[in-house]
Image (cartoon, rainbow, N blue to C red):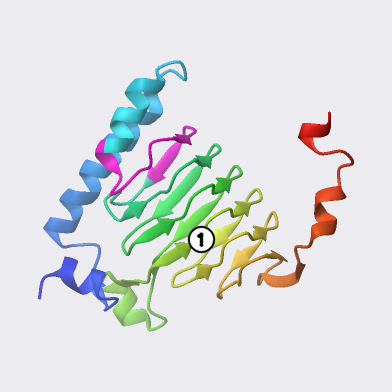
Amino acid sequence: MTEKEKMLKGLLYDANYDEELIQARTRCKDLCFAFNQLMPSQSAEQAAILRKLLGKVGRQFCITAPFWCDYGSHIQIGENFYTNHNCIILDGAPVVFGDNVFIAPNCTFSTAGHPLDVEQRNEGLEYAYPITVGDNVWFGASVTVLPGVTIGSNTVIGAGSVVNRDIPSGVVAVGNPCRVLRTITEEDKKKYGRTYHEI
């Protein structure tokens, strides 16, 4: 079994010294670098790089530079995907976003983890567990999502949260560690006064 196959199966794998994975990460970093150096007005060129880099994209998406990831090919984004500045996705395992996902600045999605045992860690071993995000999810600024987490649809993750466990659909969840604060209700539509269509 190759190190890449181990990585995609969620087993310990050699992340530091395997040539196939090093080459894949180098290709990815080169594409990220090229994307990040473009002028904001070069949106067509940016989109072309992202379509080459990412495993699956929708028709409509916006990723604001700078953006970094490890492989790119394990990332899938749905329709109307948006991330603000400084998004980092460590995609040793699949990272799948549904439709209408909004991500504020300085968020990290990390499928990668390292063994607690110091000898294994010093050998360059790590593991990668997938992250799955449903539709209509909003992440506040500086959220960190850790390996193996699933977040349900129609949920809001509050700024600064560290998400180390699954979060259900239709809730506001905040904190370190991130916990469900409350359910999102019809009353939330009235929070800002009139709706957009009434203005």
Quadrant of residue 18 within the rendered picture: bottom left
Is residue 156 rendered magenta in the image? no
Q: Is residue 143 above or below residue 118?
A: above
Residue 100 spot, x, y in % from top left: 54, 47
Residue 165 spot, x, y in % from top left: 56, 75
Is 14 positioned to the left or the right of 189 in the image? left
Look at the image and tell me in which quarter the C terminus lies: top right
Is 98 positioned to the left or the right of 196 in the image? left
Q: From this viewpoint, which residue is outermost toward the front?
A: 198
Q: Secondary structure at mark 1?
A: loop
Residue 138 spot, x, y in % from top left: 62, 51
Is residue 62 rendered magenta in the image? yes
Look at the image and tell me in which quarter the N terminus lies: bottom left
Q: Is residue 171 above or below residue 106?
A: below
Residue for point 11% across, 70% down: 2
Residue for point 66% across, 65% down: 170
| Residue that carries the numbered disc 1 in the rendered image | 134
Q: Is residue 7 above or below residue 101?
A: below
Quadrant of residue 180 within the rendered picture: bottom right
Bin the neighbour count of mark 1 within 10 Å (Cα to Cα): few under 14, some 14-19, many 20 and up. many
Q: Which residues are magenta?
A: 52-68
Q: From this viewpoint, which residue is outermost toward the right?
A: 193
Near-viewer residue (99 or 102): 99
Residue 153 spot, x, y in % from top left: 57, 62
Residue for point 33% across, 75% down: 121
Residue for point 60% across, 71% down: 167
Q: From this viewpoint, which residue is outermost toward the bottom?
A: 117
Report the amino acid beneath label 1: Gly
Is 185 positioned to the left or the right of 43 in the image? right
Near-viewer residue (36 or 157): 157
